[in-house]
Image (cartoon, rainbow, N blue to C red):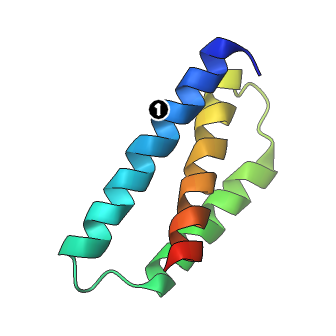
Amino acid sequence: MSDFLQKIYDETFEAVYNELLNRKKTDKDFTVSDIEGLLDSYYANEGNNWVGQSEVRLTKQSATVAAYEKILFEW
């Protein structure tokens, strides 16, 4: 992965992860089931392999999935 894409991955992962941590702390209605449902949606999108998706878009998508997986694992 190029330095440019690594930076995008890291920034996206951190932003999504921190957003999820904050939501977990502040939203009493936010549950593991919510994370699992959202993660299933991201898995489906990842598997679609849409023609024309840029490397940047795919990198952000991978970072988002990783952040959701980490939150789910830690929960």
Q: Which of 48 and 1 lies nearest the eye of the viewer?
A: 1
Q: Is residue 13 above or below residue 52?
A: below
- The residue drawn where x is 73% and y is 15% is 2
Q: Position of residue 17 (x, y in %)?
A: 43, 54
- The residue drawn where x is 49% and y is 86% is 33
Disc 1 marks a residue whose amino acid type is Glu
Task: Indicate the secondary structure of the residue bearing disc 1.
Answer: helix
- The residue drawn where x is 22% and y is 77% is 27
Q: Quadrant of residue 44?
A: bottom right
Residue under label 1, please give it: 11
Q: How many marks?
A: 1
Q: Which of 74 and 9 lies nearest the eye of the viewer?
A: 74
Q: Is residue 66 above or below residue 34?
A: above
Q: Which of 65 and 22 lies nearest the eye of the viewer?
A: 22
Q: Position of residue 9 (x, y in %)?
A: 58, 32
> In the rendered view, does 43 fall on the left or right side of 20?
right
- Would you say residue 54 is visible in this rendering? no
> In the rendered view, does 54 fall on the left or right side of 1?
left
Q: Is residue 54 above or below residue 69?
A: above
Q: Quadrant of residue 5?
A: top right
> In the rendered view, does 67 fall on the left or right side of 55?
left
